[in-house]
Amino acid sequence: MLKIIILSLVQGLAEFLPISSSGHLALINHFFPRTPDDFFLAVFLHGGTLLATIIYFWPDIVRIFTGLRLQSKKGTENRRYLAAIIVGSIPVGILGLFLGKWAENIFISLPLLSVMFLITGLALAIASLKSPPRPSLPQRETTQPIPLPSGERNGEGVSGKGSLNLFRAFGIGCAQLVAVLPGISRSGSTISAGLISGLSRQEAFRFSFLLSLPAVAGAFAIEGVKGLRAGIAIPLPQIAIGFILSFGAGLLALHLLRRLVLAGRLVWFSVYLLVLGLVTVFL
C-alpha cells in the first residue's frame, strides 16, 4: 500500500510538472520489488491525472464544443482551435502504439531513463532562453480559446510572437509523440515546443494540456482494457485510493505549473532534470 501511495502522489505531481511522471515512476520502481503489474498500475494512475486535466480545463472544453455551431467569428475560431488539436494528435495517434511497446522496455532501463531526463532538461533550458522570466506574475485571465490566424499576439501578450496555427500544432504534436518514452516529460516537451515556436506562455500552457486529452484518454482506455483482461493482482480499493491521490495531486500541480510557466520559471525544472539525469547514471 505504501508503494501505491508514493506512486500516486508522484504521478499526480510529475504528470503536470515538466519532469516526466513515467520516468519518475520507473525510477521509484527500482527501489521497490518489481511486479508484473507495475506498468499497468502506472496506466491506471494516469486516469486520476486525466480527470484532473478535464476538470481544470473544463471551461475551455465547453467553450470549444459549444461554439462549434456558431455562425460567427467566434465559431470559426473554435472550429480552428479544435482542428489544431486534431492535427496535433496525428503523430501520437499514428505512431504512439509503436513507441509504446518500446516504452515498456525503457520503463526498466535506468541508463536510458538517464538519457531521457537529460534530453527533457535540455529542452526546458532552450525554452527558458526563448522565453526569459519577467519580474511579476499577471492576474488570471479568461480561458477563452485564442484566435488562430497567424501574426496576432495572444494569451497574455508576453514573449510569444505568433498565434496557434496548424503547422505549430503539428510540431507540438510531434513533441508529444516523443514524450511517449519514459523520462521525456509530455508537458515539458509540448510547452517547450510551443514556446520555441513562438506561442505566448499562456497559450503554450493551455494548448499543451488540451492536446494531451485525446492521447492520454486513448492510452488509458487501451492499456486499461489490456490490464483488466490480463488480470491485475492489485486490489480494487488500492487502485481507487491511488486514483484519488493522483487526481488531487494533479490539480495542485496544474495550478503550480501555470504560475511557474507564466512567470518564466521553467529553468528550475531544467536544472532539476539535468542533475537527476546525471545522478541516475550512477544508480
Image: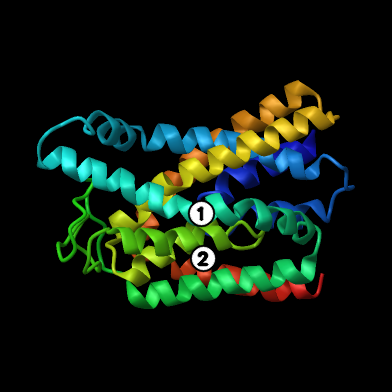
Q: Which mark is residue 152?
A: none
Helix, strand, or loop for circle 1? loop
- Residue 16 locus on image (x, y percent): 51, 50
Name the residue rendered at 33%, 51% in the picture.
Answer: 84
Q: Residues within 10 Å of mark 2 (few under 14, many from 20)?
A: some
The reply, left or right, for residue 179 in relation to residue 242 is left
- Judging depth in this view, the residue of 178 and 51 nearest the camera is 178
Name the residue rendered at 30%, 37% in the picture.
Answer: 60
Q: Where is residue 276, by image quadrant?
A: bottom right
- Residue type at the position of mark 1: Leu
Give the Cα distance between marks 1 and 2.
Answer: 8 Å
> Does residue 262 appear in the picture of this structure?
no
The reply, left or right, for residue 99 in relation to residue 31 is left
Q: Furthest residue to the left? A: 72
Name the residue rendered at 37%, 63% in the picture.
Answer: 194
The reply, left or right, for residue 148 in relation to residue 107 is left
- Residue type at the position of mark 2: Phe
Q: Is residue 9 above or below residue 162?
A: above
- Residue 104 locus on image (x, y percent): 76, 54
Q: Which mark is residue 269?
A: 2
Color style of the picture: rainbow
- Residue 81 locus on image (x, y percent): 28, 47
Q: Quadrant of the N terminus?
A: top right
Q: Is residue 219 above or below residue 240?
A: below
Name the residue rendered at 43%, 77% in the picture.
Answer: 126
Q: Where is residue 56, by image quadrant?
A: top left
Q: Is residue 238 above or below residue 18?
A: above
Q: Residues within 10 Å of mark 1 (few under 14, many from 20)?
A: many
Residue named by callout 1: 17
- Residue 106 locus on image (x, y percent): 75, 61
